[in-house]
Image (cartoon, helix red, strand yellow):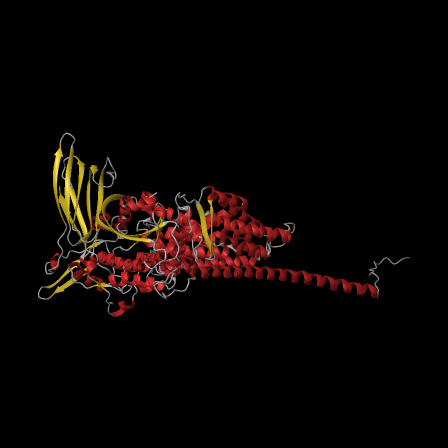
């Protein structure tokens, strides 16, 4: 009988089978190790490639910013016959105007001294030109003009009446054959109220004198005549230019204008506004080109409150400043070399100036190496030939992040404009929130992705999306005829090159391979240095000018938006595909770093003061204590004035008065002990009423000895007046009218006739700024801690009434402030 127990049998094996098992296990282990090693290598290689891409971009951007700051060497003047522009010679003129003469306010003695200095310099140049083989006709004229015009500024119409306004004019001509076609160069030698005007516009005057010296001695025959307009009243709202364009016989021959304006102390001149095809072509001859049509778009928005004589030439003809020593070496050389090249081209080479064509060009320089320009029609074809929702979303979210950061600093921490100290501070303040907003959705997508390592599919999708976005943006800006389309063309063309490289290396048939580093390199090679240079130029120009925007504008929000756009334009958008190029863990870590950096920036700028030192308590009170020998002491507290009262007090600078935080101090008691207290301006009149027409004709005569920039303001319904062409601002309406009178030195009276509706008594306010304050400036330095302050190179001697009082107040101000005195007097007459 068989055994019924269950028998467990083991499979039969031999030695060979056991060896095979060992080999199989070894192979499996090796394969597993190889896969793990490959993953680790892939993660390391993608991280290294991201680092390489970022390093390449930083190097290219640094090169672009370096090019922005590069200036030519200042050329000395070997001899008066040297036919090259000399910064050394130009600086002598800047020094004489800004230091020896100082403030050159229209209506002061300094204005007259400036005119005499220019006439002496021009006379010396005229004697040099007499030795030229071709001896161009060299005529010097002084225009004294009176007139009127309406000037619209900051949405406010200001009626201007000027008298005894001065222009110094030099006309270089080859005779009747070229007199009909003239190139005009313009600069102004007057200054605004509180600056010696080293750059604005002594630099422009100096450049014109040097260009005049060189061109008048150049042994070539002129093909077009040249007019050099040294105008004496630009800061008074462009009166001198208006006088020349509307009254001087040479104005009818002007076919093109080069307007020389300057601001600040550092950096290159820039061509940002052009309406003449000849001058755009002439600028291509500039040895150090620096130009962009995009800047014109920025100024056209009206965000930056800045204006020049360009307005008058365009309309009628078809103070960020300091002392002269602070002007950067090479800046004037750069300015002068380019202007001289343009003038020489028009004066000696251009033969088609007789029929000027309005320029409709896009133009820019590439890092100062080459100047590129082409008509918009050509640009349309070019841009379309070059020719995403997620990219646009990233831009919008970056702006949102930046604006939220600005709102937090302003409203939560109550510290507006904390970024104002340095031009690059907005990048530090808002850069983190901008990047966080841009990467918010990509980081969320990365966090929810199943891909633990790099996600090349998402990376390529983002890269292509960016290219599509810029192509569409290029089409839109080209259709809108914006200068910004040239920036879009740069981005679109470079990204297209990157896509071609990606296609050539991967054929889009290997979606699991990351975008080649070469594709990133090609997308950055031309764009990164140019856009970094352009962005730096924008920040250097825009941030200081935000001080002019006014207290009512949301300055922090505006700057945060501009900063977000700047970051996007310098290829900040490349952070989106790069997030997908690294591992999921690295992306999360990067997101945390950005969050921490954003918080750190917010906290830093929440407590940072926009000036070098914060010595204020936050209280807005001023108290003046005054002691006079033999009269005891007194104390007066300042009261803050309303906006209406401020406009009334400072009518001479209306509507700039909107920017002023105004305080009034009653110094009646103190003034009675000061013998030089100025008499207020007076007003006399005759008035006749016509009951049939229900209108009153008033003849006014103002007398203002010792005052500059007097203003007449009143509230009434004006039917007509002898201003400009008889046009009336707010005609047919009862409105607050402001009429500013400007007179060259010396002049103490003005008169006008106006017709008002009705026979009611109207209060007329007459205000002016004491002229003696500007006669008493001295180059003596302040004693003590103020001596090294760059804004304190000048002070008033205090020998006039208001300065005797205000100097005590200025002495008590913190060391980081800059104090200059102006005294405004208001008289009221009921007529």
- Left or right of residue 132, residue 110 in this image: left
Q: Give the image location of residue 831, x and y in percent.
A: 13, 41
Nearest to the observer: residue 85 or residue 352: 352
Nearest to the observer: residue 342 or residue 80: 80
Indicate whether 308 appears above or below 820: above
Q: Give the image location of residue 815, x and y in percent.
A: 27, 65
Q: Quadrant of the N terminus?
A: bottom right
Task: Say which quarter of the image contains residue 115.
Answer: bottom left
Q: Give the image location of residue 595, x and y in percent.
A: 46, 57
Answer whether residue 796 is visible to the viewer in this image.
Answer: yes
Residue lying farthest to the left in this orientation: 630
Q: Residue at x 43, y 62 (%)?
A: 70
Total of numbered circles in the picture?
0
Q: Residue at x 18, y 63 (%)?
A: 798
Residue lying farthest to the bottom in this orientation: 784
- Left or right of residue 208, residue 728 in this image: left
Residue lying farthest to the front in this orientation: 133
Answer whether residue 616 is visible to the viewer in this image.
Answer: no
Residue lying farthest to the top in this orientation: 692
Q: Give the image location of residue 36, x and y in percent.
A: 65, 61
């Amino acid at each position: 009988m068989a055994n019924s127990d269950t028998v467990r049998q083991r499979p039969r094996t031999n030695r060979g089978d056991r060896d095979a098992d060992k080999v199989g296990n070894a192979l499996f282990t090796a394969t597993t190790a190889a896969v793990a090693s490959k993953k680790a290598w892939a993660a390391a290689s993608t991280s290294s490639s991201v680092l390489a891409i970022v390093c390449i971009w930083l190097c290219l951007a640094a090169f672009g910013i370096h090019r922005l700051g590069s200036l030519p060497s200042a050329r000395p003047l070997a001899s008066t016959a040297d036919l090259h522009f000399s910064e050394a010679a130009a600086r002598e003129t800047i020094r004489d105007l800004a230091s020896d003469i100082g403030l050159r306010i229209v209506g002061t003695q300094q204005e007259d001294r400036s005119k005499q200095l220019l006439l002496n310099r021009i006379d010396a140049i005229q004697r040099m030109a007499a030795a030229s083989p071709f001896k161009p006709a060299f005529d010097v004229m002084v225009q004294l003009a009176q007139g009127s015009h309406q000037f619209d500024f900051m949405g406010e119409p200001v009626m201007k009446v000027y008298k005894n306004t001065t222009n110094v004019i030099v006309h270089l001509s080859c005779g009747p054959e070229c007199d009909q076609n003239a190139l005009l160069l313009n600069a102004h030698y007057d200054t605004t109220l509180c600056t010696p005007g080293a750059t604005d516009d002594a630099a422009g005057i100096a450049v014109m004198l040097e260009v005049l010296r060189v061109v008048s001695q150049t042994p070539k025959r002129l093909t077009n005549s040249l007019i050099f307009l040294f105008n004496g009243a630009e800061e008074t709202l462009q009166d001198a230019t208006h006088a020349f364009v509307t009254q001087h016989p040479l104005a009818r021959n002007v076919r093109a204008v080069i307007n020389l304006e300057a601001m600040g102390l550092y950096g290159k001149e820039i061509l940002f506004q052009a309406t003449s095809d000849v001058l755009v072509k002439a600028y291509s001859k500039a040895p150090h080109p620096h130009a962009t049509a995009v800047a014109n778009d920025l100024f056209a928005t009206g965000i930056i409150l800045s204006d020049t004589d360009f307005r008058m030439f365009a309309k009628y003809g078809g103070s960020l400043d300091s002392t002269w020593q602070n002007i950067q070496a090479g800046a004037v050389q750069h300015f002068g070399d380019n202007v001289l090249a343009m003038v020489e081209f028009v004066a000696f080479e251009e033969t088609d100036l007789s029929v000027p064509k309005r320029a409709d060009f896009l133009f820019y320089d590439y890092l100062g190496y080459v100047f590129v320009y082409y008509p918009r029609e050509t640009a349309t074809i070019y841009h379309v030939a070059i020719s995403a929702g997620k990219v646009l979303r990233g831009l919008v979210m970056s702006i949102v992040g930046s604006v939220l950061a600005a709102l937090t600093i302003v409203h939560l921490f109550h510290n507006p404009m904390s970024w104002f100290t340095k031009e690059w501070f907005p990048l530090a303040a808002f850069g983190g929130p901008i990047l966080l907003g841009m990467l918010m959705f990509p980081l969320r997508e990365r966090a929810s992705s199943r891909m633990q390592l790099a996600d090349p599919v998402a990376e390529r999708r983002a890269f292509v999306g960016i290219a599509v976005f810029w192509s569409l943006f290029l089409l839109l800006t080209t259709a809108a005829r914006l200068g910004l389309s040239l920036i879009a063309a740069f981005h679109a063309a470079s990204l297209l090159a990157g896509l071609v490289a990606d296609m050539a290396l991967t054929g889009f048939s290997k979606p699991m391979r990351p975008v080649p580093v070469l594709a990133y390199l090609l997308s950055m090679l031309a764009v990164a240095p140019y856009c970094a240079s352009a962005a730096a130029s924008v920040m250097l120009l825009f941030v200081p000018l935000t001080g002019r925007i006014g207290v009512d504008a949301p300055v922090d929000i505006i700057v945060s938006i501009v900063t977000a756009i700047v970051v996007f334009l310098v290829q900040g958008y490349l952070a989106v595909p790069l997030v997908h190029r690294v591992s999921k863990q690295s992306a999360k870590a990067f997101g945390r770093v950005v969050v921490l950096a954003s918080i750190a920036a917010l906290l830093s700028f929440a407590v940072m003061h926009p000036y070098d030192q914060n010595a204020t308590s936050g209280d807005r009170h001023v108290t003046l204590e005054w002691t006079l020998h033999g009269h005891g002491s007194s104390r007066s507290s300042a009261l803050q004035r309303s906006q209406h009262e401020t406009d009334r007090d400072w009518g001479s600078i209306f509507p700039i008065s909107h920017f002023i935080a105004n305080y009034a101090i009653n110094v009646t008691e103190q003034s009675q002990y000061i013998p030089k207290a100025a008499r207020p301006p007076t007003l006399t009149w005759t008035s006749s009423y016509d009951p049939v027409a229900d209108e009153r004709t008033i003849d006014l005569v103002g007398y203002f000895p010792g005052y500059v920039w007097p203003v007449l303001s009143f509230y009434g319904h004006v039917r007509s007046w002898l201003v400009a062409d008889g046009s009336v601002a707010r005609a047919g309406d009862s409105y607050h009218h402001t009429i500013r009178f400007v007179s060259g030195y010396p002049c103490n009276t003005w008169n006008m006739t106006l017709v008002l509706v009705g026979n009611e008594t109207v209060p007329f306010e007459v205000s002016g700024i004491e002229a003696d304050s500007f006669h008493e400036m001295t180059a003596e330095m302040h004693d003590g801690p103020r001596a090294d302050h760059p804004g304190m190179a000048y002070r008033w001697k205090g020998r006039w009434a208001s300065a005797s009082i205000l100097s005590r107040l200025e002495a008590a101000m913190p060391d980081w402030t800059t104090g200059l005195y102006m005294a405004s007097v208001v008289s009221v007459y009921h007529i």
